[in-house]
Image (spheres, helix red, strand yellow):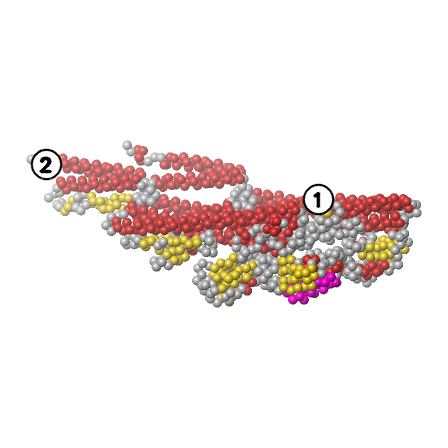
Amino acid sequence: MGVGLNTTLNTAKVAMLVDQTAISVVGQNIANVNNPNFTRQELQIQAAFPIFTTPGAIGTGVRPTQVIRRFDEFLQKQILENQTHMDKLGVQNDAFLRTERIFNESDGFGINRAMSDFFNSFEDLAVTPDGGAERSNVIARARVLSQRANKINSDLKNLRVDLNTKITGGVDKINKLTAQIVEMNRMIHESETTLINANDFRDQRDALVKELSQFVDISSFEQSNNEIVVSTTSGRLLVAGQAAFQLKTIPNADDPVTSDVYWTDLSGNRVNITDELVGGQVGGAIQIRDNELLDYKDRLDHVFATLIREVNRIHAGGIGLDGSTGLNFFNGLRPSSTADSKNTGTGVIASATIIDPAAVSVDKYEILFASAGSFTVNNLTTGQTSGTFTFTAGSSIPFFLGKGIDVSISGAPAAGDKFVVNAARDASMLIGVNSQLISNNLKIAAGTTTHFSDGSNALSIAALATSRLIGQTVNAGSGAFTLSEFYNTLVGDIGTATSSSNSNLKQQEGIQNQLFNRREQVSGVALDEEMIKLIQFQHAFGASAKLITTVDELLQTMLNMT
Amino acid sequence: MPFRITNQMMFNNSLINIFRQNEDMLKLQEQLASGKRINHPSDDPLGTMEVLDLRSQKTANEQFLRNGTGGTSRLNQTDSLLDRANSLAVRGKELALGQVGALATPQARATAAVEVDQLIQDAINLGNEKTGSRFLFGGQDTATAPVTSQGAYVGSPTRLRMNISSGNLLDIGVLASEFLTTDLNPALTSSIPVADLHKGAGIGAGTFSITDRAGTTVNVTVSAGDTIGNVINAINSSGANVTAAISADGSGITITDNNTTPTQNLTIADVSGTAAADLGIAGDRPVDSFTGDDLDPVVQAGTLLSSLLGGSGLTPGSISVVNGATSATVTFAGATTVGDLINAINASGTNVTAGIDSTGTRLTLTSNSSSTVAYAHDLGGGTTAEVLGIGGGRNLILNLQRLSAALKADDNAGILGAIDNLGTGTDTIQTVRGDVGARTNQVELQQTTLEGSQFDIGEESGQIEGANAFEVASNLALLQSAFQATLRSTASIIQPTLLDFLR
């Protein structure tokens, strides 16, 4: 008993079909050679069930089993993590490069120069206190300095606005992507329940997840029903099977140029997750917007608040050529006090006014309620705790009275509530020359007497240039830095941050490139390889055809025998 | 299985390499174009900080150099004017020497007196010399003529000063009261009547309000007959939490607020009259303590000797008073007030009357006889007569005036005295010139130091931020050849595929 010729014919037919299928898989691979999200596919085949006969089992040809993707799950996870990190660094690097240009000192016409020129103009005034040209020059230099400060302040603000646009746009994109992932989940689920590998849908879904990881740091896993669950790395669900959780941006009440990101749970409760997002373009933009850029702005404000306070203190103690006294040189500081947007109590800042402009502390303070009845004051500028105090609603806080600011909180704050009091806030934006002095420069108090050429007050102001004003207790003159040293350190720090952001990004790009190459090695399409396979299956197809011809001839022979 | 090299891998790697080299070349090109190694803070953050610190120093030094140049020219101008003052004194002395002795006739003396009168006018004009529109010898009062037509000093007692390097203040002016005339310049004391303030113009009586920094408002009334002590006591006992006192340098009244938690400005305002404004304390000030305007009291008989010369005090030494043939030595034993000095001179038995000049800045000494001219000169190297403005040393104008009077009165003793006093006058002028010269040297020395340090700063910042053109250019050439090699190899790797060989 042997195998019939018809069986052999069938073997050849199936083999030709398999070869055709294999060639069409090769065709799919070649067609997608430049699709970065494509995963190389392969037709898997196995020998067909044999027929048991004498002398033994005789094969009945080949059967296709499935089309598989050459895919490395672990590698894909690494790529996602790296992508998130790289996009974060990318958005931050852009922001650092812009910051660096905002604080551009390399042409020699930045704040550093304007500050030197400002103090020099007082040296000139001290030499010729009654000189009209010298007085005009003082005003002109002060205005240039103010304008430079205003410009940096508004440039920094614009940068934060642009980052915010990136954040709100990114959140919109995240919502679209999560909706698309939900759709792909549905399609993959439906296809694969019929036991067909949805390779191309999976490629698409992987591409969507990868794109999502460009915006925010996520983690994902596949459930047994072939749907994936995506959440932020802090654990907020974004996609659960066929449900998407939408994010929303809402402008922050204290800092209107910024928006907070909210996550809505199944029961419709909004949770502020702004601080939780640390990766991708959105996380990166949030981090630099709320940390580095705010820090730079605070430090710039600190310089100018100190300048305003000190120059005004000395100027107001002098006498103008027209006999005027007590005038500020720069417009005075305005204290800012804000309640944290996450506060749960009903406490509000009832008042915050500067009562002693000559001695006001320009440090940034945080009032942190330990309980409803007591609070701790932390000096955020020095990073030290200033003490714990008993809370009395509506009455001036004695600690701040001693710092020259009248602050009172009314209502009932709850434990954990925070308030920030900062007399220096936006000093770099507020700084401007007192308009009375601009309209009549005789009011510049160059002296402390009405003698026409008394330049002693101008000398005192010029001496501020080399006084260690920053980091001192008020008026002690024994701080750590002069104004320009403190500012120069700020520029240096921005340079350091930019330079390390540059090299981090470069390094990350290198890693990303390696990972890409490793993915390509597993999943990428190599044309030469596909050509070889094409020829391989072409020959197999030819051989099967030859088999049919041969069987045909055998059959002819048999038929002709009768 | 060998390492699979896919098409995307090859293209991707080629692109990355080309971009990276392009970026490096752009950076070098930027360095070559700007000539600087540091074009952004991130190029070298530490270097950036150093360069910025150096630039601050450099700009400050530029200012001090400018100050120094201005100061030197001011001092040089002063020196040439002092030279002129010296020739006036020498000419006066020559004229006096020519008219001394029995041979000189009254007519010749009268003729000489005409020339001396011209010298007096020259000396007064010299004292009112200007640079631009500003009086040179009036100290901080540059807007008003410091020397009156009588030769009294009405300028400020404080010289002009400027920084010639950081914190190095140098006086760049000379006062007319140092070589043409004198200024007793009494400091404030509590016994001084308010009527003597402001060179004797006094202050307007009236009521002013003081609002301390805690917000307490009180009124204080000053009447025309009050002394400074009365005013200070009235403020201190007014109920406002402030303390008034005479300022440390004796120029004005210092008001100090004693509130630990200020809630507002320290405000002093006139309610009726002009007392607060005249006392130099009116105003709305956000400060705890301030010193009001210079009150400039005049010398009165009751003025304490210890308060003279801006509070440095005058310890009187012996002087000789000469009037015609009579002369006497006055020792001023036990004198404590200006009145004591006047009384001692008047009691010297030389038929003279001492008094206080109408400007309240010096004393006067006149002979009771119209035929003689009284003068005084110091004994034993003292400066009492000179400082009081009754003869010798710095009083060039007065000495010339006495010579003129003696010539006109045909008073031989007076002419002899003038020769003596003009002689000490030239000594004084030489001393002042020496002082000016020393200050000029000081400025020039400082300028040299500053220029040296400017050079060093330029050198140092050049080393930190400057690009070495040769190094950058050769690096660029290296990169260029590497870049060409990359392009060539990319071209040869990317082109061939199996397709080229399948037919």
Q: Is residue B284 above or below residue B31?
A: below
- Circles 2 and 1 in contact, beta carbons < 8 Å: no
Q: CA distance from mark 2 to mark 1?
A: 135 Å
Q: Position of residue B118 (x, y in %)?
A: 82, 44
Please give the range of residues in magenta. Answer: B222-245
Residue drawn at 39 percent across, 58 percent down: A271
Residue at the image point whose x is 20% and y is 39% from the top: A16
Viewer-closest of B273 and B5 = B273
Spot the residue most to the left.
Answer: A562
Measuring from the top left, give residue B354's x and y in whole percent: 84, 57
Question: Which of the labelled discs sits on residue A558, or is there none?
Answer: 2
Residue highlighted by disc 1: B132
Task: Tell me if B179 is positioned left or right of A189 in this view.
Answer: right
Horizontal and vertical percent position of residue B378: 83, 54
Q: Which SS class for mark 2? A: helix
x, y percent for residue B296: 73, 56
> Quarter holding the N terminus of chain A?
top left
Task: Give the letter of the chain under mark 1.
Answer: B
- Amino acid under label 1? Gly
Nearer to us: label 2 or label 1 = 1
Q: Quadrant of residue A536?
A: top left
Q: Is residue A157 above or below residue A355?
A: above
Residue B114 versus residue A395 in the image, above or below: above
Instruction: Tell me the SS state at disc 1.
Output: loop
Viewer can see residue A480? no
Please tell me if label 2 and label 1 are on a single chain.
no
Left or right, B136 with respect to A57, comes to right
Q: Which of the labelled discs sits on residue B299, or is there none?
A: none
